[in-house]
Image: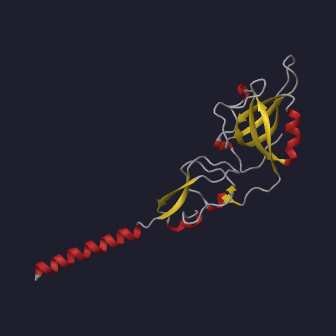
Amino acid sequence: MRLWLGLVLILGSMFAGAYLLSAGEQTITVWRAAANLAVGDAPVVEPISVRLDDSALAYIPASSPPLGRMRVPVAVGALLPAAAVGAGEPATGRLITVAVDSLHAPVGLDAGDVVDVWVTAGDANESSTPALILAQAHVQAVDRDNLGVGGEIPVVLAIDRERVAPIIAASSGKISLVEVPFAAQSSGADDRS
């Protein structure tokens, strides 16, 4: 009798312990960034199961897809906060193609990158100080297969409608694109000078 009572107590405590441990390890499946996501990007995400406890409401569950565009930058591998994704950008944006000499664009420039647009006015015979004409422009496309007459790379930028005229005016000078590191990207505010 003692033997059976001991076995029941041991088995009962094992099942109670397993239940308590499994209750403490409940996970939820949420989205995490599959790539560095800049402001204005469409979310590129993958599901991951994590234990979040009380903070679970701050993240988008994998059962509902993230809709809209990025409001703030999110690094690759980071969980996707619900506040980081919102409605698409207002319809005031425009796409503009600029011709950039291959030596005046970052190596590996690709869609999704964020760049500052600088222009050096004048011709090659006179020296001129470069001027920042647009900060944190989003690169939409880079077409390295269709080079311009002088070997320029066509780069498509997403910009505000008000910035179209300065970009077109700058096209008579030498345009340089400077990549903005992911950590230095702002929440979409233009730091124009």
Quarter of the picture containing the N terminus is bottom left
**Residue 42 against residue 149 in the figure, above or below:** below
Closer to us: 95 or 38: 95
Question: Relative to residue 12, is residue 133 drawn left or right?
Answer: right
Using residue 98 as the reference point, say whether residue 42 is left or right of it: left
Q: Nearer the viewer, residue 75 or 109?
A: 109
Q: Which residue extends farthest bottom?
A: 1
Judging depth in this view, the residue of 177 and 149 nearest the camera is 149
The colour scheme is secondary structure
Q: Hey, which quadrant is residue 25 in on the image?
A: bottom left
User: Image quadrant of residue 63?
Assistant: bottom right
Residue drawn at 40 percent across, 68 percent down: 24
Rendering coords of residue 62 (x, y %): 54, 63
Quadrant holding the C terminus:
top right
Q: Position of residue 33 (x, y in %)?
A: 57, 52
Question: Relative to residue 51, is residue 11 drawn left or right?
Answer: left
- How far across and down, in percent of the image, does residue 80 sit? 59, 57
Q: Residue furthest top?
A: 125
- Residue beneath the point at 81% across and 55% down: 91
Q: Is residue 52 above or below residue 46?
A: below
Asked if residue 83 is positioned above or below residue 99 in the image, the reply reads below
Q: Position of residue 88 (x, y in %)?
A: 73, 58
User: How many numbered markers are drawn?
Assistant: 0
Q: Name the residue: 30% across, 75% down.
A: 16
Name the side, left or right, on which 13 lies relative to 101. left
